[in-house]
Amino acid sequence: MKEILERTSCRNFKDFPVSDEDTEKLLRAAMQAPSMGNQQPWDFLVITDKAKLEELAGIDTYAKFIAKTPEIIMILGDRNEMRFPETWMMDCSAAAQNMLIEANSLGLGAYWFGIVQSQERVDFVRKMFDLPESVIPFSLMGFGKMNRWTKPEDRFDAARIHSEKW
């Protein structure tokens, strides 16, 4: 529970690369996520090149922090791997959450930046990385050493819990 309760979003990183070992741990955590019928409809694109990160920051006016992110792991949905196409976004969300929790356990800061909800963002990423039509960009997961950690608020709210009926 510690990793879940202490997880917080970070968009301000030290200029320090994520180790290959930590990147593999993040990807292993992602691929361990549950998926409908074990379809595992995901692929992952690791981006560390500073020029690409700067270009990727142009995806949205609110995405300038991407340029200063040491590592991005993009989660991609692969239509060719979807036996249950109606659930691929839930599967990729579980992979994203696993990466966020693993990042916290590794002492890394992390954020989740959605792509799939905006056709402009999808088109931007598809063109930038020459993605085939069968591959759908889902989200960007940013990782790095945090400049500073801030304790997250306790979000538990008993008023939102219902038992047996509304």
Image (cartoon, rainbow, N blue to C red):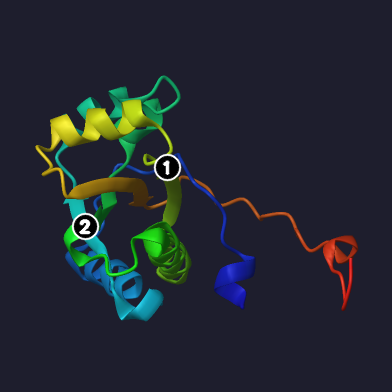
Quarter-wise, where is residue 18 in the image? Answer: bottom left
Residue to which mark 2 is pinned:
78
Kindly indicate whether the residue at mark 1 contacts the one at mark 2 (C-beta within 8 angstroms): no
Residue 12 horizontal/vertical position (percent): 45, 39
Residue at 19% from the left image edge and 53% from the top image edge: 46
> Does residue 121 appear anywhere in the picture?
yes
Query: Which of the image's four quarters has the N terminus?
Result: bottom right
Query: Which disc, if any, is residue 125?
Result: none
The amino acid at mark 2 is Asp
SS category of the residue bearing label 2: strand
For label 1, the crowd category at 10 Å Cα-Cα, with few meaning under 14, some 14 to 19 and many 20 or more, is: few
Q: CA distance from mark 2 to mark 1?
A: 19 Å
Rendered view: 46 above or below 39: above
Which percent across, then down, holds residue 42? 26, 62
Residue assigned mark 1:
113
Q: Is residue 39 left or right of residue 80?
A: right
Q: 83 or 109, which lies in front?
A: 83
- Residue 48: x and y, percent? 18, 45
Residue 53 appears anywhere in the view: no
Residue drawn at 41 percent across, 19 percent down: 61
Nearest to the eye among marks 2 and 1: give it.
2
